[in-house]
Amino acid sequence: MESDVVVINHHLFFADLAVKETGFGELIPEASSYIFDEAHQLPDIASLYFGESLSSRQLLELAKEIDFVYRTELREAKQISKATEQLRTATLDFRLAFAIDKGTGSWRDKSRERIMRLHAQRLVQVMEFLSEVLIERLGKSEVLDHCYEKLSQFTLLFKKLNDVNESGFSYWFDCTRQHFSLNITPLSVAERFQLECKKKVATWVFTSATLSVKGKFDHFTELLGLQNSQCLQLSSPFDYANQTLFVVPRLLPEPEPPGLATKLVEQLAPVIRASKGRCFFLCTSHAMMNQLATGFRQTLTMPVLLQGEKSKQALLDEFIEHGNALLVATGSFWEGVDVRGQVLSCVIIDKIPFSSPEEPLLKARIEDAQLKGKDPFFDVQLPQAVITFKQGIGRLIRAEEDKGVVIVCDNRLVTRKYGNLFLNSLPCMPRTRSLLNAIDFLKT
């Protein structure tokens, strides 16, 4: 609280807002300036914190608490034990009704299935019955009184999560092998975020290498409701014109044909050899990542590292230590990774990073855009893909002396009109369609 400068991550900032809303305290002090680095992440993180969630873990933990009170304080109230067991059983049965091992999906769609409606009705009945049982014992145990309040909150929230017809929200579920969570996430955090900004008399600064799309900040400012904001795009200190080469190889098929991984290994192995390893291969799916790693391990003699086999930091340390490795990765390696110097001389991207339209939050934003008469592809999917694309490209040049090649194995950058949106959002990098030019550049 006495510090002049406090450095935290985005999640802690929003967690602090949540704690302050309860009126029970605060995690960080008020400040005169709030500076967000990697600010392109803010809209999605804010959506999660401004949303609501109920999980089987919460319900089972509540059942455990109530059962503990029964066993230690109210042994005569056997009905509490029976009602608590019903809550536990109904919660576990609700998880089984999803009939999937694990995964995420639209709760708005899933909740319409007859089996899910029946289990949802059953869980509401059990929660309301347990509530009636606890009412008769209120005042006899402080812990039980607290449990009753929590049960009331969970019951209201569960009913809200099952009223999936309200527009402007994404309703989604997430399942692990044993547990589930139901979530409601606002599609726009603009109004809520602006409310928080107005509460604080402060300066707000948002910075990132990927806030703009084709030189404009509209996509970002609209997501956070930043009206009348001052926007500034600064030129890069890096000499991209002389230190980089951007390649979209010829003779590659459209993404997702059978055997694409084999073709990519065949065409790109010579480039990776010319680069003496020192290469990131960034993929848009785990399936492609695993296929490529297998192919390159059979083809190359240099070390091939694979995301998931070790921790992120351990892989980066090993990549730097080897000095001639290929790292095949996805997800978290597209951003927030800083490898400087010639130990990283080549970044290869398998295709334009469009998010799956089945991803719940994106799917809901697409539906919302359709309702508002917008074009979901151009107004929602494209801007987000451009930002992710720029993050991946940004892994290569991290210091003024860095030099290297970026290869994107997706002809849509050249064959589709929207390809220009991606290309025009990049620094001024010389372009070629020839992998031989890339090999020559890496050898100089």
Image (tube, rainbow, N blue to C red):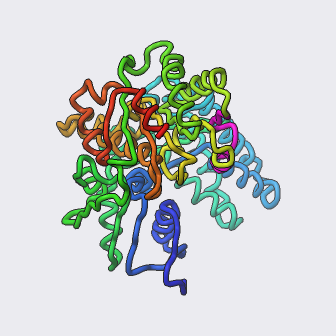
Q: Is residue 125 visible?
A: no
Query: At which x and y percent is residue 310?
Result: 69, 42
Quarter of the image that includes the N terminus: bottom right
Left/right placement of residue 317 relative to residue 244 reads right
Q: Is residue 284 visible?
A: yes
| Residue 81 or residue 257, whichever sits in front | 257
Left/right placement of residue 198 relative to residue 311 reads left
With respect to residue 125, does 317 lie above or below? below
Q: What residue is shown at x 25% (from left), y 63% (from top)?
A: 232
Q: Residue furthest top?
A: 258
Q: What residue is shown at x 49% (from left), y 39% (from top)?
A: 346
Q: Magenta stretch?
A: 303-318
Query: At which x and y percent is residue 242?
Result: 35, 48
Q: Residue furthest front?
A: 444
Count of number-bearing discs: 0
Query: At which x and y percent is residue 95?
Result: 61, 33
Q: What residue is shown at x 43% (from left), y 39% (from top)?
A: 405
Q: What residue is shown at x 72% (from left), y 55% (from top)?
A: 65
